[in-house]
Image (cartoon, grey):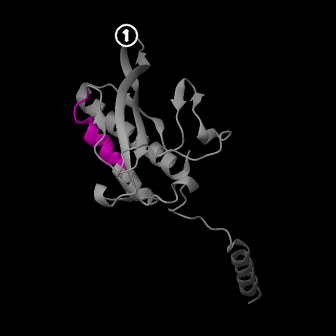
Amino acid sequence: MNRLFSALALSLLIGLFTSGCQYELGDVKPSYYAGINNIHVPIFKNHTLEPRLSSLVTNAVLKEIQADSTYTVTKRSSCDAVLVGNIREVKKRQLRSDPNDTLESQELILFLYIDFHLEDPNTGRRIESTAVEGDFYGKSKQIEGEEVIKAGQGRVIGETIQFVDPSYQVGERNALSFAAQDLATKLVSQLANCW
């Protein structure tokens, strides 16, 4: 009986001290996007030679926005902002080669680059932050050779590893899908949290 009372008292104390500690899901967007609740996501423009990459990336971004729930995806006529994306390039680098032949790749690292920004649905002008000049989000900044432009805009790089096997096209398509998912997670994190 004494142990039961001790366990009950301990759980009550833990509940009392942790009642103020909460994790909030959704609606934690930056203050300068406080008026933006509904986003329209048109299909991203593909400036690469990869076929069907537009739909792959756009669908990954849509799914991630819906999973994050900071913004609601809606049609253009009822949105507060339009998310415009341009798929810039796909890069591959050798990660591991065959031990007997250094020119034959066994693993590649794949990078998928997109540029994005938010636009006003009525005027088509970019929505920019109103941050103070000294703030990181109020100006452009160089990070590892890539320019990050104002909050809610910039470049996102999705990456993954591609294993080279006899069915190269299947492996490449799967790798592009994983890179698109990584890219979507990073993009939505920048829109929702500015990081």
Residue 4: quadrant of the picture:
bottom right
| Residue 75 visible here | no
Query: Where residue 184 appears, x then y in whole percent?
Result: 41, 44
Query: Where residue 182 appears, x then y in whole percent?
Result: 43, 41
> In the image, what residue occupies the spot 58% across and 29% down?
143
> In the image, what residue occupies the spot 30% across and 55% down?
76
| Residue 53 visible here | yes
**In this picture, is 2 found above or below 158?**
below
Q: Is residue 175 left or right of residue 134?
A: left
Name the chief secondary structure element in magenta. Answer: helix
Q: Which residues are magenta?
A: 50-61
> In the image, what residue occupies the spot 37% across and 10% down?
103
Residue 98: quadrant of the picture:
top left
Identify the element where label 1 is drawn: strand
Q: Which residue is mark 1?
A: 103
Disc 1 residue crowd, few under 14, some 14–19, many 20+, Cα 10 Å: few
Amino acid type shown at disc 1: Leu
